[in-house]
Image (cartoon, helix red, strand yellow):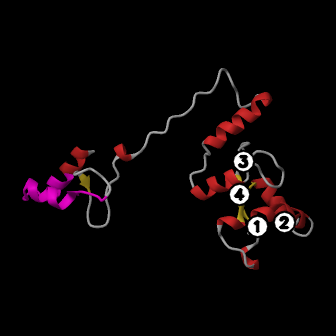
Amino acid sequence: MWMRQARFACRKHSKKSWKWLKKKYWGRIKGRNDNWVFMNKDLYLWKLQWTTIKRHILVKGKSSPDNSKLREYWHKRQADSPKYLFKSRQILWRRQKGKCLVCFDLIDNGESVHVHHITPIRCGGTDHINNLCLLHENCHRQVHSNRGQLIAAVCKLLEPYAE
């Protein structure tokens, strides 16, 4: 990567000296002990060496996610590394202990997952994490289709999670 950066700088400013190029394109960032960070005034290029390595735990024996006897093992394993990219979804997943609040099945059972507003935005709810929960797509559809009957029961279940 460094060679590409140097080649770019030399091609862009072919008449300038190496000292000038270094001053213009490379520098230091606070908190990093690195002199060669490709940057400008506002942005810098992230170096792969700054990324921490997260080791995975090997699956024990010939365990399969389809084995119903090992369901707790797989649930615990997923709890250590939720697949959600967004931090807010990881927080919701941990807060709900990985379970859907309507059917009480595991969130990570292969179905798509939706974020549900406990108090709807049109009724004064917000996008704050205390007003959100994770539901399976079908459970979310049930909550919204049976507004009159099911919503009251679901709201009682969700009350401990809302502030």
What's the magenta region? 8-30
Residue at the top extreme of this rendering: 61
Amino acid residing under circle 2 = Cys
- How many C-alpha atoms fall within 10 Å of the one at disc 4: few (<14), some, or many (≥20)? some
Disc on the earlier residue, 4 or 2: 4
Q: Are marks 3 and 1 in contact (CB under 8 Å)?
A: no
Quarter of the figure with the N terminus = top left
**What residue is disc 2 on?**
155
Q: Nearer the viewer, mark 4 or mark 2?
A: 2
Measured Cα–Cα span from mark 2 to mark 1: 7 Å
Contact (CB < 8 A) between labels 2 and 3?
no
Q: Residues within 10 Å of mark 3 (few under 14, many from 20)?
A: many
The disc label shown at residue 114, or none: 4
Real-space Cα separation, disc 3 to disc 1, in angstroms? 17 Å
The local secondary structure at tag 2 comes to helix
User: Alpha-carbon neighbours of circle 2 within 10 Å: few (<14), some, or many (≥20)?
Assistant: some
Label 2 vs 3, first from the N-terminus: 3
Displayed quadrant of residue 126: bottom right
- Give the amino acid type for the residue marked by disc 3 in the picture: Gly
- N-terminal-most mark, 2 or 1: 1
Question: Secondary structure under badge 1?
Answer: loop
In percent of width and height, residue 18 lies at 9, 53
| Amino acid on which disc 1 is placed | Ile
Give x and y (percent) for residue 36. 22, 51
Q: Determine which residue is flagged by label 3.
A: 98
Is 146 left or right of 85, judged from the image as shown? right
Residue denoted by label 1: 118
Report, in whole angstroms, how far the alpha carbon at label 4 lies from the one at label 2: 17 Å
